[in-house]
Image (cartoon, rainbow, N blue to C red):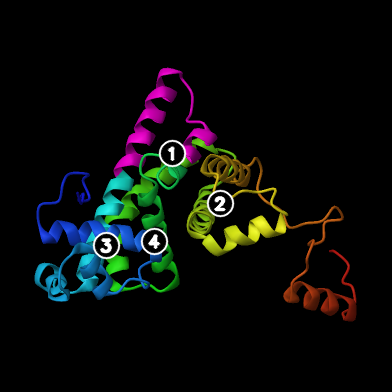
């Protein structure tokens, strides 16, 4: 029996189309699914997509808007539990538990497909933004992101506000690559000579959380070597050093 997005039996062609769209988008990505494939998997004709949703883009938007809302609610529930526990214990939220609240929406056992779908949405928006990805990210995800960064700032008081925003932005990128990187997973296995098993979701989750927690470590990141010079000078730094060597030194006054 086909299940719709709420986990209940789908009683209409509209429900079936939406359910199979989730399945196929998770398996093949957004661009890897045709209208014909959607219709065939749902046991309908191609005209059914246009009849019920207008076109494939509208169906895609409906699927990913629902995915965004489900994952946001899950993360909000996680944050609420974390904040309540921290308040009872008279402390700020812990960094690891705040990171876990974010990762849990992408890597979990009870709804693994939802995390993959959300990763596809965010990657699509970052790589090739469209009107519908912009609408979903702005309307469904931005408010949560602000809420999450607010809690995250309390967990990392050693970082200033701009650093937290930067690291949150990069954290999202790391999670997206890890969750959706089928090709990079194969490369990880190859480079590690089989030591790393990307399909072990528990190990992947633990490694991802450890990496993200470390990225918010104490003190601002530095690009200085032990002698105070940049560890890897960029072009502008080299030009400045060359200019300094050619100009006479001016004594301090």
The circle on residue 21 is 3
Q: Is residue 208 left or right of residue 77?
A: right
Residue nearest the observer in this picture, 35 or 137: 35
Q: Residue at x 17, y 44 (%)?
A: 8
Please give the residue where the numbered disc 1 appears in the rendered image: 101
Find out whether residue 213 is within the magenta segment. Answer: no
Disc 2 crowd rating (10 Å Cα; few below 14, some 14-19, many 20+) is: some
Which structural element holds mark 3? helix
Q: Quadrant of residue 81?
A: top left
Please give the residue where the numbered disc 2 appears in the rendered image: 163
Q: CA distance from mark 2 to mark 4?
A: 35 Å
Instruction: Name the outermost residue toward the top.
Output: 89
Q: Residue at x 43, y 48 (%)?
A: 106
Tag 2–tag 4 contact (CB < 8 Å): no
Q: Quadrant of residue 227?
A: bottom right
Range of the magenta residues?
A: 73-101
Dot 3 or dot 4, earlier in sequence: 3
Please give the residue where the numbered disc 4 appears in the rendered image: 27
Dot 2 or dot 1, earlier in sequence: 1
Expressed as whole percent of the image width and height from the top left, the position of residue 93 reads: 47, 30
């Amino acid at each position: 029996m086909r299940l719709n997005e709420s986990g209940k039996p789908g009683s209409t062609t509209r429900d079936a189309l939406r359910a199979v769209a989730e399945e196929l988008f998770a398996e093949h990505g957004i661009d890897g699914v045709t209208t014909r494939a959607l219709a065939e998997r749902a046991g309908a004709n191609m005209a059914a997509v246009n009849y019920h949703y207008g076109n494939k883009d509208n169906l895609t938007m409906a699927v990913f808007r629902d995915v965004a809302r489900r994952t946001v609610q899950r993360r909000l529930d996680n944050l609420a539990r974390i904040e309540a526990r921290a308040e009872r214990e008279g402390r700020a939220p812990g960094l690891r538990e705040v990171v876990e609240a974010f990762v849990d929406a992408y890597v979990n056992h009870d709804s693994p497909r939802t995390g993959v779908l959300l990763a596809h949405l965010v990657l699509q928006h970052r790589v090739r933004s469209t009107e519908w990805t912009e609408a979903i990210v702005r309307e469904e995800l931005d408010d949560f992101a602000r809420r999450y960064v607010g809690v995250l700032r309390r967990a990392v008081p050693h970082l200033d506000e701009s650093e937290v925003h930067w690291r949150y932005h990069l954290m999202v990128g790391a999670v997206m690559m890890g969750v959706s990187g089928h090709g990079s997973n194969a490369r990880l296995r190859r480079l590690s000579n089989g030591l790393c098993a990307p399909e072990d979701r528990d190990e992947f989750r633990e490694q991802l959380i450890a990496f993200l927690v470390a990225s918010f470590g104490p003190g601002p990141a530095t690009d200085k070597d032990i002698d105070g010079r940049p560890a890897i000078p960029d072009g502008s730094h080299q030009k400045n050093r060359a200019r300094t060597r050619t100009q006479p030194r001016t004594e301090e006054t």
